[in-house]
Amino acid sequence: MPPSVRGAVGTLASGAYPTIVRRGGRATQWTKRPDLPAANAEPAIDAAVPVLVTWQHPATLSPNPFPTPFSTLNPEIGMTLALDETDRAVGGPDLPQMRKVRTSIPGPRSRALLERQRAALPAGVGSVLPVFVEAAGGGVVVDADDNSFIDFGSGIAVTTVGNAAPRVVQRAVGQLQRFTHTCFLVNPYESYIAVCEQLNRLAPIAGPARTVLFNTGSEAVENAIKVARTVTGRPAIVGLDHAYHGRTLLTMSLTAKNRPYKHGFGPFAPEVYRAPMAYPYRWPAGPENCAREAADLLTDLLDRQIGAENVAAVLVEPIQGEGGCVVPAPGFLPAVARACTERGILLIADEVQAGIARTGDWFACEHEGLRPDLVTMAKGLGGGLPIAALTGRTELMDAVPPGGLGGTFSGNPVACEAALGVFEEIERHDLRARAIEVGRVMRAALLDLQRRHDVVGDVRGRGAMMAIELVKGGGDPSPDAELTGRIARQCHQQGLLVLTAGSWGNVLRFLPPLSIPNALLDEGLQVLGEALAADA
Ligand SMILES: Cc1ncc(COP(=O)(O)O)c(C=O)c1O
């Protein structure tokens, strides 16, 4: 098991105090202990039982509120600390930030759990990397066999502020102790409103906005369509090629890729249409013609094929996630927005994956100054807890009559507190700037890989949402899904968690948490480079 601290009895320097003490698997949260004398105090910890202690020194509180990892304690704190193999890992930024592969991947404990999974779960539920997680935080995921993976996935762009981020945990734990649920539709609570107020301020909506909360990205997209149909009185929804919007009937219908998302699940929802995506790398007439031609094809679909007067909304991902981190050709999204405005069609930006600081802005729309009518978000919003939101122009959102929006669990109070913790983490650590820096480091390394390996056909993305598209090479841009699978597996074996994506399964996606230390980011990119070199 991961090392922890044992027998932590000693002398504290002035003002230092233990924040978390775990004994026998139980965790006790201590805030500042007024009973501790200021200097040379001895905390009441029994050295005879295994304990895990993390220390927080006032000097570490500002500007960085992350507790100092025990491994880097200032010696002036004067504790006698010994590493112990008996305790279990605690997640969050205290987790030792290292890549460590102790066993074959998956290791024996994970393989045993996988057997149980196979006996208990349907085959349709799979995992990218079936190592069973014990703890995660900073930039690592630690499994049941004490392997520590560099996290380039963030649970598919969810733990943007870091796994078990301190403000998220603190707020969620506090809420769990107060009440777990009332159903906002029965008895409201303040945190729901606070999340909505914040999103009304932040979302790239022109003019006053309103927000409603849900549990999943799919639900938020479904509800955006409900609002758009109510407002316009029109049935049709236009999505894009390579899009992914979810697994419910309507969002699955709007999702482009057949396997594994749609095959056998039809018939699909009616009045769903699809326009080509402005995908620069694969545009037949070249990237320079991509935005204009794709916009023309969209307007042709609206005017000639469907009839603009029948179209309620056009739904776009400002950067496509599952479709392979495809950044639309510059100018395409503004052209779509103009086409919608001219025709009384609403523009829905699905920011479920790209939103909430991942790309360096609060929302990926902002990059091209896009002002959609409705914005959906989810993943990064709850720091790992399930919460989703739909924000839109007030007059649109108010069109749905009372009772038309909501759900039993929507805007759960624990998830709302977690979201408030996410906003705090982003502001405190200036995580938007961090996303830009992570993107700069990744792009430089990935472009270098492209120079060295002609199978790296394209490098793209923005901020901490980057990808490479792998092709046959030697001038042949045909997608190479087998190579992509091999490289992903090799990275996994070497302790780097990467995700695949793309309509042809030939994209490697990199979505690290913004709490990842620079050293781990560099090391992860090096592991990727070694995997590519080994396959050459
Ligand atoms: C852009 C986008 N929209 C919607 C969804 C669906 O979200 P959920 O899985 O929370 O239903 C996803 C999930 O990956 C997504 O990336």
Image (tube, helix red, strand yellow):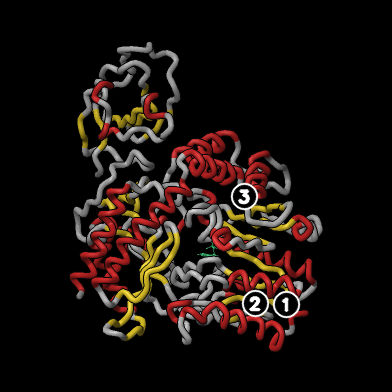
**Separation of disc 1 and disc 3 at Cα?**
28 Å
Give the residue type at disc 1. Val
Q: For the residues labelled 3 and 2, say whether their Cβ atoms are less than 8 Å apart.
A: no
Where is mark 1, residue-wise?
311
Tell me which corner region of the image, top left, top right, bottom left or bottom right, holds residue 471: bottom left
Measured in 3D between alpha carbons, the distance from the residue under mark 2 to the one under mark 1, in whole angstroms, is 7 Å
The first of marks 3 and 2 along the sequence is 3
- Determine contact: label 1, label 3, CB under 8 Å: no
Q: Is mark 3 within 8 Å of ligand 1?
A: no
List x then y, in percent, for residue 315: 62, 71
Q: Nearer the viewer, residue 439 or 239?
A: 439
Residue 342 percent across, percent down from the top left: 74, 74
Q: In percent of the image, x 47 and y 79: which residue is there? A: 287
- Name the quadrant containing residue 27: top left
> What amino acid is found at the position of numbered circle 3 in the picture?
Leu
The residue carrying mark 3 is 202
Residue positioned 26% across, 21% down in the render? 76
The percent coordinates of residue 272 (x first, y second) are: 65, 79
Q: Which residue is mark 2?
A: 238
Locate residue 359 relative to residue 6 in the image: left or right.
Answer: right
Q: Is residue 14 above or below residue 520?
A: above
Q: Secondary structure at mark 2?
A: strand
Depth-wise, is mark 1 or mark 3 nearer the camera?
A: 3
